[in-house]
Image: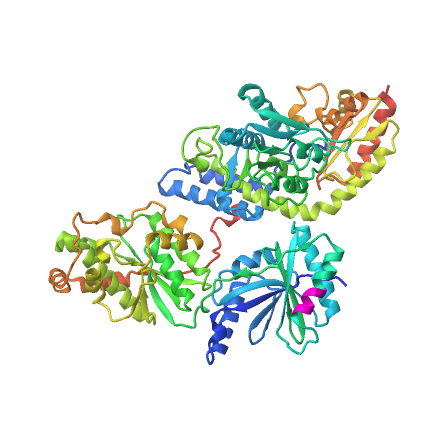
């Protein structure tokens, strides 16, 4: 009988250990997987206590795999053959799986059987030997227990046995949505997309707020932010992006405040806007890409002076990371190339020559009393443009392709 | 006129023409300009690159737009040879490559002091893997083998070549995919550089791509601005290049639909033509079904082509790119064919637009020509 890879076996991440909430987590994960794979209508899903099985029914696994790799809550997944739990079927299917690897150039292997169903008549070692010895006598493969070209995994369960030759690492973390919602301050730089990614990884859904200061910031800078939001949307299906017009506030700060405090006050305004919008959108926290000590506004004194304007928890996932560590993650999640595109953002245009490194809240308040920022903020919030960004957007030029 | 020369070029697809006209009318701006109109063209060009890359299963930054396959071939061969000169100056190609590849190698040998091995082929046009193994050395920096030969349709054993090259990680592999893309399955894993052309796929003339894996360095042949990763200076012909994505998408769609019809045409033609006295087949049985080369041993190519033209058929004798310079087919010569076979070659190349009736008429025309003019 001929066996084929007909399903994907999905292993859950950390949630396997979460006693009571486990059911909610698994349900959310299945929903997220289904949303992510909604473009593949023939897939069938089967959920057990610690596994999700996706029957391919002819859908292309090569297209599915990169999408699954972005779903949080998955530890790893494998393309698997499903065979009856009897030793002859295991040997035959195991051998066939090995032959597929030989076609792909493999020369050495190792069999690794695991009995999830302990009542099976043979122990793991006996299963290993039966499959390996049959394969050795019927092919040129050699056993290498230390660094084999591939490991044939045989997972023995009561109903079925699963045969796999490869394991793809998943994104880990918790399924997005189980941890509530937060507002991410998305600037277009390297850090904030990484902060968003790390937050979603903990199961928190994000919305994005971006501050635009045209004409000091260009249309391209805004498109860059949309592209970044689109990349982040892959991890949670879609993402809401709020673009707040910031020019008038920016100019008012420039006119009324001492230059050394310009950045501090600008950040305070941004926090206030994120706080208000966040409350409107039922967000429980603010997320941003700040880390300690990179720029003047990121000293602890500065953080305190800025943070004091909101009572929401502010999550700073990369607060202690080196720039290089952040860049590593940005590259891994493909946001780096977009982030380094050279468009001015509002942080770089109004940069003072000597920003204060140890600001204090009293002084900041003193400057802020000089202008009516409340009504400017109100106006900015009213004129905020909100859009829903999807991972795959239909291009308005699609007829050209 | 009945057109039987689709390997030389193809008519433009209506859908491509429509989109291209729309582009020409509305998107004239320079794709490198920073104003909104330029940015929009740039954006469309990059979307096209993204789609092309995803259809070919490579990264977008691995797609370089060129003016066609000849440029892409030259860019790959010379670009690698120059960029990796420090690692060695030995190059390997085959005796039956397209002229753009062969001439690039000949120039590297003649003017730049590289040492080139030209692999022999057997009577079916298949390269000698044994010779390749023996020719490989630590200072071999490039192997270039076409996937499908343009004159006889032989499919080269690229997978075997990849296996041999696995032992030489420093050596780059270039594969000319012009006659393979949209015709047979093409897999770019283990291929460092690959070339293809739009006008062979019902797309625009003056449009091709070089697939260059991101870890491969190239010395640019055309210096200029930042276009195409700095590898190809000059104002981008964005409208033409944008059309590559659609051309490729439609071609891959057609590949599936057309397969059974093309096989039927090929089997019929091969069968009927072989039955004619003095006709011999040059294309091996397992060649690409799109290309069929045969020879009439009693009637040389040129008069035969003229006689077919008079009956309303457009065919080639040798590859169109070499048709005005070379006395006979160097491909058939490399295959060890007799002189009368070499001089009597006719190449027809197929497309789904050719009907079974057209094919039957063609067979009759050849039959009459052989009878009437064969000497």
Q: Measuring from the top left, give residue A401's x and y in whole percent.
A: 53, 46
* B195 falls in the magenta region: no
B112 left or right of B181 in image? left
Question: Does any portion of residue A387 appear in the rendered image?
Answer: no
Q: Is residue A159 above or below residue A97?
A: below
Q: Nearer the viewer, residue A21 or B241?
A: A21
Which residue corresponds to the image point at 61% horizontal and 42% vertical from the top-left? B166
A371 left or right of B113 in image? left
Q: Nearer the viewer, residue A98 or B18?
A: A98
Q: Is residue B63 above or below residue A205?
A: above
Colouring rule applied to residues: rainbow
- Quadrant in the rendering for residue B9: top right
* A126 falls in the magenta region: yes
- Quadrant in the rendering for residue B110: top right
Give the quarter of the figure containing the N terminus of chain A: bottom right
Give the number of marks.
Answer: 0
Which residue corresponds to the image point at 77% horizontal and 23% vertical from the top-left? B342
- Quadrant in the rendering for residue B117: top right
What predominant SS class does the magenta segment belong to?
Answer: helix
Q: Nearer the viewer, residue A115 or A248?
A: A115
| Extent of the magenta region | A125-130
- Residue reaching furthest to the bottom: A20
Question: Does any portion of residue A226 appear in the rendered image?
Answer: yes
Q: Measuring from the top left, give residue B19's x and y in whole percent.
A: 53, 42
Q: Is residue A1 above or below residue A99?
A: below
Q: Measuring from the top left, give residue A270's x and y in whole percent.
A: 25, 61
Q: Measuring from the top left, give residue B328's x and y in whole percent.
A: 73, 21
């Amino acid at each position: 009988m001929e066996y084929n890879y007909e399903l994907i076996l999905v292993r859950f991440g950390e949630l396997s250990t979460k006693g009571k909430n486990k059911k909610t987590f698994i349900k959310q994960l299945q929903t997220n997987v289904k949303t992510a794979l909604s473009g593949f209508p023939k897939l069938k899903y089967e959920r057990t206590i610690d596994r999700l099985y996706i029957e391919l029914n002819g859908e292309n696994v090569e297209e599915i795999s990169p999408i699954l790799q972005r779903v949080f809550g998955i530890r790893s997944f494998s393309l698997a053959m499903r065979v009856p739990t009897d030793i002859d079927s295991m040997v035959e299917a195991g051998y066939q799986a090995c032959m597929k690897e030989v076609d792909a150039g493999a020369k050495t292997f190792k069999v690794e059987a695991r009995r999830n169903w302990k009542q099976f008549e043979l122990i793991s070692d006996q299963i290993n030997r039966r499959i390996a010895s049959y394969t050795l006598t019927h092919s040129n493969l050699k056993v290498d227990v230390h660094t084999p070209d591939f490991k044939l995994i045989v997972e023995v369960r009561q109903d079925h046995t699963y045969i796999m030759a490869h394991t793809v690492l998943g994104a880990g973390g918790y399924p997005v949505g189980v941890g509530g919602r937060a507002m991410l301050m998305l600037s277009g730089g390297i850090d904030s997309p990484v902060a968003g990614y790390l937050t979603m990884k903990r199961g928190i859904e994000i919305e994005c707020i971006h501050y635009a200061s045209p004409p000091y910031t260009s249309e391209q800078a805004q498109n860059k932010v949309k592209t970044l939001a689109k990349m982040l949307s892959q991890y949670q299906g879609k993402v809401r992006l709020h673009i707040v017009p910031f020019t008038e506030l920016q100019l008012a700060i420039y006119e009324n405040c001492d230059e050394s405090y310009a950045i501090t006050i600008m950040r305070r305004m941004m926090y206030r806007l994120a706080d208000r919008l966040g409350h409107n959108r039922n967000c429980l926290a603010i997320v941003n890409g700040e880390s300690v000590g990179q720029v003047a506004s990121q000293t602890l004194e500065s953080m305190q002076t800025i943070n004091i304007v909101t009572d929401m928890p502010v999550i700073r996932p990369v607060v202690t990371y080196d720039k290089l560590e952040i860049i590593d993650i940005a590259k891994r999640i493909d946001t780096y190339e977009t982030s380094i595109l050279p468009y001015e953002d509002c942080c770089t245009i109004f940069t003072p020559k000597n920003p204060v490194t140890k600001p204090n809240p009293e002084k900041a308040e003193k400057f802020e009393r000089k202008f009516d920022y409340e009504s400017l903020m109100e106006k900015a919030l009213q004129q905020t443009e909100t859009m829903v960004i999807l991972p795959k957007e239909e291009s308005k030029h699609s007829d050209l392709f | 006129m009945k057109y039987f020369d689709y390997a030389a070029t193809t008519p433009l697809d209506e859908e491509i023409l429509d989109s291209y006209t729309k582009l020409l009318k509305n998107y004239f701006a320079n794709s490198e300009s920073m104003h909104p109109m330029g940015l929009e063209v740039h954006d469309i060009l990059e979307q096209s690159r993204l789609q092309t890359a995803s259809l070919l299963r490579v990264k977008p930054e691995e797609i370089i737009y060129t003016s066609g396959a000849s440029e892409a071939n030259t860019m790959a061969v010379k670009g690698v040879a120059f960029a990796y000169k420090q690692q060695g100056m030995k190059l390997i190609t085959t005796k039956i490559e397209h002229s753009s590849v062969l001439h690039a190698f000949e120039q590297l040998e003649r003017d730049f002091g590289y040492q080139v091995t030209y692999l022999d082929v057997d009577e079916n046009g298949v390269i000698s893997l044994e010779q390749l193994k023996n020719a490989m050395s630590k200072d071999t920096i490039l192997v270039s083998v076409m996937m499908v030969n343009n004159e006889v349709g032989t499919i080269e054993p690229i997978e075997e070549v990849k296996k041999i090259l696995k032992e030489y990680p420093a050596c780059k592999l270039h594969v000319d995919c012009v006659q393979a893309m949209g015709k047979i399955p093409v897999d770019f894993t283990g291929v460092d550089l690959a070339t293809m052309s739009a006008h062979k796929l019902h797309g625009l003339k003056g449009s091709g791509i070089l697939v260059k894996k991101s870890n491969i360095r190239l010395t640019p042949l055309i210096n200029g601005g930042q276009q195409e990763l700095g590898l190809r200076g000059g104002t981008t012909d964005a409208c033409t290049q944008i059309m590559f994505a659609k051309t490729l998408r439609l071609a891959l769609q057609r590949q599936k639909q057309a397969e059974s019809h093309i096989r039927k045409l090929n089997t019929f033609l091969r069968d009927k033509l072989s039955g004619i006295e003095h006709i011999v087949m040059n294309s091996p049985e397992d060649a690409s079904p799109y290309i069929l080369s045969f020879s009439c041993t009693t009637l040389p190519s040129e008069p035969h082509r003229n006689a077919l033209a008079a009956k309303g058929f457009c065919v080639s004798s040798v590859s169109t790119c070499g048709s005005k310079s070379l006395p006979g087919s160097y491909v058939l010569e490399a295959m060890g064919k007799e002189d009368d076979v070499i001089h009597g070659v006719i190449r027809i190349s197929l497309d789904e637009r050719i009907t079974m009736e057209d094919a039957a008429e063609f067979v009759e025309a050849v039959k009459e020509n052989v009878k009437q003019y064969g000497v």
